Every structure is written in C-alpha cells, then in structure tokens.
Image (cartoon, rainbow, N blue to C red):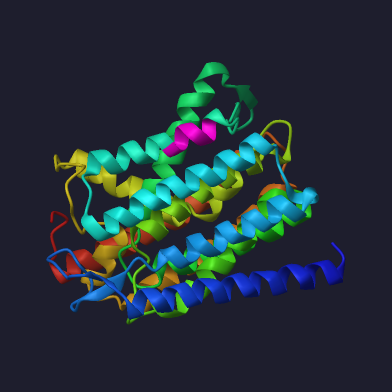
Amino acid sequence: MRLENLLTHLAFAGLLALIAAAVVRLMIAYPILDEPNARSAHTRPTPRGGGLGVVIAFVIGMLILYRTADFARIAERQFIGVILAALAIAGVALIDDMRSLSARLRLAAQIAAALVAVGSGLVVSHLALPWYGPVGLGWLGIPLTLFWIVGCTNAVNFMDGLDGLVGGVVVLASLALCVLSASLGGWFVYAAALFLAAGFAGFLPFNLHPARIFMGDVGSQFAGFILAVLAIAASRFDATQVSFTLVPLLIFGLLFDAAFTLARRAVMGDRVGAAHRTHLYQMAQRAGMPVRRVAAVHWGFVLVHAALAVLFLRLDAMLKPLVLLPALAVQLAWAWVVARRVRTAGLSWRG
C-alpha cells in the first residue's frame, strides 16, 4: 500500500472515531441509565448504549466504502446483506438497552441476522484439521456458520461486564486484523476492521475505569456479529479457508472465557441460561484484582494472539490449526491463576 493511501485511510478512520465520540457524548448527555444490581460491577447508575456511536461510525464508513472504493468491495449481495443484518441486530439490541427484551426475542433477532448473512452467501465451506488438511463441509457448512455467528455474537456480549475490557480487546483485535488483511490483500476485511477499530477508539476513552458510559448490547452484540462475519470473509484469503482461524485466534480470550464458563456451569448443574457473575474475568475482579488490571490482561491476550497470528501465516496449511494450542495454554494458565485467587478469597463459583 502506498504511503499516501495509508495516510488517507488513517485520516478517514480518525474522522469516524470523532463521529463515534460525538454520538457517545450525546448518549451521556441524554442517558439510558443502567441501574446497578447484585450482578453489576458498578455501584452507581451509569449511562449505557454508547455502542450506538460505534454502529453509526461503522455504517458511515461502510456506505462510503460501498460507493467509492471498488478495490475493497465484495459481492454486492454479500455487502448489502452484511449491512442490513448488522443494522437489524444493532436496532434490536438498542431497544433491549432501553426496554429489556426477553432472551428468546434477542436470540431470534441474532438468528435472523445470521440467516441474512448466510443467505447472502457468507458461508464457511471447509474446516481445517491438523495433519489432515481442509475437509469440505458440504451442507453442514450452513448450520456451522450459523452457530459460529450466533455463538460469537453472544460470547462478546457475555464478556462485556467490566470497564474497558471488551472495548480495548475489539480495538486491538480489529487493528491486528487490519494489518494482517492488508498483508494478504484482503481489502474488504482490511477496511471493515479499520472502521470497527475507529468506532471503538472513539468510544473507549469514555469506557475506561471508572466508566462514564457502557457500550450496552447495541455495542457488544454488534461487535460480536461483525467480528463473526469478518472471520468468514477472512476465510476467503486462501482456497482452503484455513484463514477463518485468524479472527477466532485474535479474540480467543473472549471466546475461551465464555465457553469455559458455560461448560463449567453445565457440569456443576447450574442453569446455563440463568444470569450470573461467574465468568473468569468477573471472578478475578471479585477476588480482588483491580478492574484496570483485568482489562489489561485481556488486552495482553490480544497482543499475544496477534503474534501467534503472524506465526500462523508462516506455517504449512496442515499445521496452521495447531497455532490455537499455545493460545489455549495461555487461557488455561489464566483460569488457574483466577481459580487460585478465588480459593484464597473464599468465593463460590455459584452465583
């Protein structure tokens, strides 16, 4: 990429960040208040819905991209499908922030948005296995893609419970994906990741501890959905679709905590769908780890996983999936650290 083009892209990203920040300021001035409860990490009413700034900045960026930048476009049906699905999931999530919709309605909206994305042609058709190589999924690609989109959307949403944690992770993961995509010539993913990073860069200063505003479901569900879709788009970087692994690797800290907590609660006989505050990040904070440190640990995970992503690009196709093993080792070490702190603090894993 030529230097003048890069500077233009960065200037445009800066403008989007300012737009996001301006919307966030409006949401603080005219707040949707999040009242603290027994599961909250905050102790005073705090505005939420700041993710609306991210949504508006991202959509503006994508519409301008659609009209002016042919080099970064994908098929028109897919492009429009992604935008419509993202707007739909953000709209329902914003209503949820204002009125608290039922879990079934939220899930139905997520599935509908995922169906729009899949219906537009964004489907993972291969799965890479270590030492064996890519395996064609056939018709299984559709349900697996739907499961990935809905699962990633909810994983990011579940992890948004501590000041600055998810916002910082999305900024760093999006920037890393932006750089990796540029190196591979994946210009649509490059542009979309840049816009997502810009939107969250405008939001994050207001969300650092002690947060002046929370992103709300409109921000967390939107971010999870977009990252899920970008993972599918990134799979087109190579014919075998092994590059699908890039986005899950970058946000592996969020995905691991969500999956680990759901699995642990199921094994312990707890209601998996019931509200709780026993995610690893929540237990770490409850056991005495400062909020800023817990968020910084998760930011650090992204940096470690970004280094693994660079290694991923250099490995043989059949060995690429193995790069998830050191990422898993890092997360298991974190779970052990949290478990020790929980035991020392005398906390229960139920609640």
Residue at image point 30% right, 64% down = 161
Residue at image point 33% right, 64% down = 337
Q: Position of residue 202 (x, y in %)?
A: 52, 74
Residue 271 within the segment the image draws in magenta: no
Q: Answer above or below: position of 76 versus 298.
A: above
The number of callouts visible is 0
- Evaluate whether residue 241 shows in this view: yes
Identify the main secondary structure in magenta: helix
Q: Most extreme residue toward the top, as rendered?
A: 139
Q: Quadrant of residue 163?
A: bottom left
Towards the viewer: 139 or 253 = 139
Q: Quadrant of residue 120?
A: top right
Residue at image point 56% right, 57% down = 59
Q: Answer above or below: position of 109 versus 280.
A: above
Q: Position of residue 19 (x, y in %)?
A: 55, 73
Q: Answer above or below: position of 56 versus 271.
A: below
Towards the viewer: 17 or 266 = 17
- Using residue 257 as the reference point, say whether residue 176 is left or right of it: right
Q: Quadrant of residue 99?
A: bottom left
Q: Position of residue 81 (x, y in %)?
A: 56, 38
Towards the viewer: 31 or 350 = 31
- Using residue 40 as the reference point, say whether residue 218 is left or right of it: right
- Using residue 258 as the reference point, say whether residue 152 is left or right of it: right
Residue at image point 31% right, 78% down = 290
Q: Quadrant of the N terminus?
A: bottom right
Task: Magenta stretch: give its range.
Answer: 113-118
Towards the viewer: 235 or 61 = 61
Q: Quadrant of the C terminus?
A: bottom left
Q: Position of residue 104 (x, y in %)?
A: 24, 38
